Amino acid sequence: MRPRLMVPVLAAIAAACSDPMVPRHAPVYAFADIFGDVFHWPADRLPVRFYADTRGDLHTLVADAVSAWERQFLYGEFRGVLVADSTAADVIVGWADSVPPVVDPDGGPPVDACGGVTQGILDSTGRAFAEPFRTRISILTGTVYTPAQVQACVRRVTIHELGHSLGVLREAPDTQAIMYLTPRVPAPAAIDRRSVEVLYHTPATLSPPPP
Amino acid sequence: MGVLAAGLPVGVVLGLLTACPTIPLFAQVTVYATVGARYTSTLVHDSIVTPIDVRADLAPALSGGVNLPLSGPWQLDLLVDVTTSPVRGHRSDGTTTSITRVWTVGVGVGLRRRLEPWLAGRAAVGGLKYLPATAIGLFRDGAGITPYGSLAFDIAPEVASRHGLALELAGDLHRFLTPALRNDGFVDSRVVYRLTLGLRADLRSAR
């Protein structure tokens, strides 16, 4: 077992091993806005800072949603953190009006007991966001849904709205996506993962708001 | 042949142990430790719009073990090896993203012998486990134990040898693939090599 024999053997082994096949990554649904503009958080702005209204369990809902999105990425493209000061946040999440009771979510079929909206305002150049994204989660009034059904709905909608703040600037057409207009699934699906994966490797045409 | 959890063939270990003419006396055992720096080749190469490579930073490496006498010039080497470093994604445009810190722990068994008065060589096989600090990214679903093979050479000029010191050059090979990568469409594992340059110290030499 002389070194002059071992080194070529090692080199031969290494040379014989070709690179494994790289899987094809293709977005499942479009993420650009209607004008074709693309936005995602750049690496030098990570972790993205989220502030959640302290009422109810929104803090937990946002933390879970951030975690759910982080898990979709293979290579650390997105990371988020909750901050206690809304003036130091990149995304501000609040209740639109009433605060739902904190109960265990219903495990039954999804119902539209809540809604949400995420707003990003562009500056005068139209090429950068002027201020933090603002997300509002609303409870639909006049409905007869149980608190557990409402809780399941706000979980889905919080993940969905945070998806918009990540850069998915339109709704997904697939009912199996969390980014579907009225989300039916409880978490980002494979089609969401494949789409945000490509989004975060696509050159952005819109810049984030000032830090 | 039974297989340990770490991927070590039980038969190999038993065979080596039974090759000992006698149970080695404690006085014949050498205990050693090695401290060094380790380079790890690319763990993952992918292309999402543009190419991206995942690599571990240059890392400190700490290993230790015992050498037990066998027949003739051979020694049985039982070793444990630990490394820790951040793992990052490197894009073709030069930007990097931090994924997580990863620890690797290897357990191995090998054969060692003196090749020259100033040179010793070792070949070993074992199991290697990646332990991410957080279950995220390509480690979100953990990582299994993978077998590895290694070669190491200890260079000890007489002056260093007198103090039980040696310069160690080591290299090992293993295959890398995680459940998250498999779930994302990777089929084949990638061959990863690690090169280590370290200082070996015999903490307790055979007499």
Image (tube, rainbow, N blue to C red):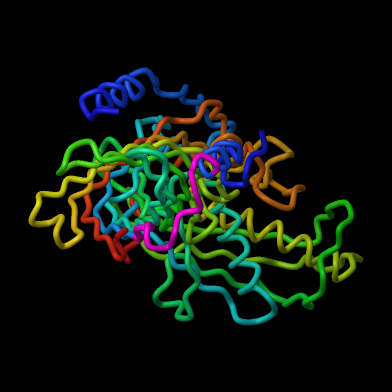
| Left or right placement of residue A162 versus residue A9 in this view | right
Which residue sits at x=89%, y=65%?
A145
Q: Is residue B131 visible?
A: yes
Q: On screen, A156 above or below A141?
A: above
In the rendered image, residue B25 lying in the magenta stretch gets the answer yes
Quick check: is B58 in the magenta stretch?
no
Name the one closer to the observer, A172 or A192: A192
For the record, the magenta segment spans: B18-31
Percent across and percent down for residue B115 are: 23, 36
Left or right for B37, reference B56: left
Q: Is residue A203 left or right of residue A57?
A: left
The image quadrant where one finds the N terminus of chain B is top right
Q: Position of residue A103 (x, y in %)?
A: 81, 74
Vertical relation: B123 (above or below) A66: above
| Residue at point 81%, 61% (across, down) | A113
- Residue A179 in the image: state x and y as whole percent: 64, 46
Q: Quadrant of residue A135?
A: bottom right
Residue B118 image-quadrant placement: top left
Q: Nearer the viewer, residue A191 or A1?
A: A1
Residue A81 position in % (x across, y down)? 48, 67
